[in-house]
Amino acid sequence: MSQTVFAGPFVGREEEVTRLSGVLARARDGEARAVLLAGDAGVGKTRVLDEVAARGARLGMTVLTGHCVDLGDVGLPYLPFTEILGALAADGRFAKVVAGHPVADRLLGAGTDPAGEDRGPGPRADGGDGRLTLFEGMAGLLADLSDVAPLLLVLEDLHWADQSSRDLLRFLLSRGLLQRPAGGSPARRLAVLASYRADDLHRRHPLRPLLAELVRLPAVDRLDLRPLPDADVTRLVRSLEDRPLPEATVRRIVERAEGNAFYAEELVAATDAEAGGVPSGLADVLLIRVEQLSETAQRVLRTAAVAGRRVEHDLLRDATDLPEAELEAVLREAVGRQLLVAGDGGTYAFRHALAREAVYADLLPGERSRLHGTFARLLAERGRRPETAAERAHHSRESHDTAEALAASLEAADHAQRLRAPAEELRHLEAALDLWAAVDPAARPSGEGCDRVTLILRASAAAAHAGEAHRAVSLTRAALAGIGQDADSELAARVRYTLAGTLMNVDNLTSAFSYSSEALALIPAEPPSPTWVWAAATHVLAARQVGDNATALSVARRALGMAERLNLADARADLLISLANMEGEGRRSPEARERLKEARELARGAGNAPVEMRALFSLAIGCYEAGELEECLPWLSEGLDRARRAGLLSSPYPLEMRYLHLVLLYTLGHWDECVRTAVSDLAVLPAAAGYRVGPALYVTLARGAAEEAVARARALTSGRFDWMATLVASIVLTDEAAGRGDAEEAVDRFRSFVEVLTDDAGTPPDVAVRLAGLALAGVADAAVAARAGGDDAAVRRWSQVAGELLETARKVALRGGSGAPQGPEGRAWLARAEAEAARAATGPDPVAWERAVTAFGFGDVYELARCRARFAEALLAAGRREEAAAEARAARETAVRLGAVPLRESVDALIRRGRLGDPPAAASGDRAVALTARERDVLRLLALGRSNRQIGEELFISGKTASVHVSNILGKLGAASRTEAVAIAYREGLLAVAGEEPRTG
């Protein structure tokens, strides 16, 4: 991309440019990095990026720049990346690399996507399969480009980025593009610099959560571009004019500019305005500069403002209807006045977005509408290309051509769907629905799927795939309101059971049961019909959710017979799954698994991917509930692969499978992989909060970053009620309170969360057993402390509380949510709860803790270690020192391997207190390999005595992030304190002494 032309020399910003140049140097050496450049509008972000990009180009880096554009309430999916790919496609140097990646053709509009697979009787919508492929394709292309030459990727104006671009950026930065490849592959020579307007980010701006996530990544930093010092602004002002400006004028401009370089340039440019004086606001300054142009140039500028930030030369010529020579003359005038700049590909852009906004706002309403209509017509005359549909829709809507806006919005929705951009598809569909009533019925698009109810159901599906479950519900409610009293009974039933399904996805179970009951009542069971069977299948699910198992079983058995009579294989499969989950011991029994395998084959043969995935999820969770953790993984792998092929990765059962996969990684002790996978899922599923972060939050807490874990857990419960998010938060907050020694809060957490998670039938959640075990740890600690202090009243009180919590745990464990006793996991947590309750009542009981250790042997690595630590404590109290030492060593080894700092520190304290031996140190070679580059930076500052806040300031990270790195270092070095960590690091050669180089492994 060519550089922007600026009015004056580059002034100031030495520190910022030096830092960014350092990022480029590290990228050239194989350490991929990203920096988010924040600053107010006009503060100089683009100027800094251009300066750094020029330096990168001089260093031999390939510089690729993409711009985000404000298109109002519609988005143009992947626009900055499309711009980058367009530049690559036009550059013969990269033809071979680009040719090896079909993502280029796909985003540039040359590729086509297959139709989505059949989803059964409900509305069909394509999901995340193609989207994930697109994301991985873009990552592969950038990685291959960085192999050819060091790569600098510049993304400007992220505050205007469409959601798909934000999701793709999240994927690229979090999915390993910035990490050193495994297996000895060459390092990626890549730097990413992305800018955004900090003053545009209101509280609900969609970029805010993405920024919060990205800055936590080790290879991502944020650089705030502060206002320039007055001395630098003065230098800039004086350099902008050949003639000397009066001192008073310079001082006034510097004062008014407030460190904003763009403001200063605009104020200087307006000093010779015929109107005299300096305007009181920036918009006035901009408009005064515009008014200094000729009448024709002003007209061209107003026309360009309607087109957007950038406009093609040919499009602008046709819109203004000026002869080529005259247009070139007025464009030269506008460029000379620094209002427009010439870009690549025969385009012109406003030098700053504020200039375009000011010109656009100054248009008369009629003038604005007429010009929008001109652009809509010109774009249509160029051919109804799908990639221009969003622009045509925007211009048509602003010109009040509702019929054309409706048609273009539907085209844009189709294009977004092909690009697997569900958020943009939803926006365009909602725009179309808003326009529907304003368009004459004869002028509306016709054909299959072009009636209002069908479009609403399609929008509901898009909302679900975009992670907006509540929006999906409201849209389906709108479909119900739109079918009318005289609607076909089968359509009315279909809308109602679809609504019931969406309501179950947001845990509105009573309403879901009500609507599924209505759906079933709308159509007779005889003669048999597919609609009745599917309504019945949905009603079975809803009835089971509200605890009406008798109704669920009765309807399921009757509907299964009807499905067999009608030869509805996928409906049979769905009903077989429901029966396998309800009958006997449920899905963990061998008989149920055989039935589930039969259902899987029936659904596969019928081509119904959602039902097939439901069967696969039931097989996986059945193995997990039976304690067969390793057997669970193949079913999950098959289910997620099926979801990818069907394009349904964001649908409910794949979400459950993703969460279960994270739970397995956490439970089996693969914590680093658990965190990496959660970050990867976050790139694809930004809205599925509980599903994507749950087990990773357990890791965060267990590794000692309690403050971060608590903040993120509370954030999960800050919006609308989400059952999974609430469950995750309940585990984190209860465990943290108990670990902090606040027994009162731990018990309050237990009671409040059990209450809110209890279903409409009054059945407590299965997780109540785990929550009881966690809360009882705090209660037992309080009772032990009270006993040691001779406070008998407190001991009695805490013993009574422990009994109450244990009673709840026993009831839930012995008769879980499905009505059957819980499996190995539930029994293990009950054993722990009983051991903690005994500790509260009488003190550590070796027999009870041995039972807990044995129970967690089913595969929960961390909880086994925690129970072993308690077992060691009980053995020590019983005088069985050798056995206590063995259990403590085993617990410590697990804690060190996992990086579970609080547990390791607790065990170390027990070992020292009980004189059970010195804690073993980890091998030095392992330490060197385990420390990341960022952790080595933190370790160096630790050795200098820096606090977490000071470390954060020096490394441009938050104090919380610095604390997490410190905790990880302590865990990896097996150190109980910061001082001990530094001592170990010096001893093992991880820190340099005078005249030496540190060993890096």
Image (cartoon, rainbow, N blue to C red):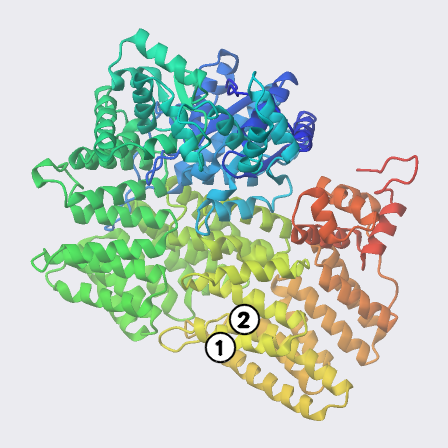
Q: Nearer the viewer, residue 979 or 925?
A: 979
Residue position marked by numbered label 2 in the rendering:
826
Spot occupied by residue 315 in the image (x, y as percentages of width and height):
30, 18
Q: Amino acid at mark 1?
A: Val
Residue position marked by numbered label 1 in the rendering:
812
Q: Are marks 1 and 2 in contact (CB under 8 Å)?
A: yes
Q: Nearer the viewer, residue 804 or 669?
A: 804
Relative vertical location of residue 680 with respect to residue 252 in this rendering, above or below: below
Give the numbered dot on residue 169.
none
Going by the picture, which residue comes out furthest to the top? 325
Where on the picture, by quarter, is residue 744?
bottom right
Residue shown at 57%/37% (left/top)?
A: 255
Relative vertical location of residue 23 with respect to residue 795 in this rendering, above or below: above
Q: Amino acid at mark 2?
A: Gly
SS under mark 2: helix
Can residue 213 be seen from the camera position used here?
yes
Q: Nearer the viewer, residue 975 or 439?
A: 439
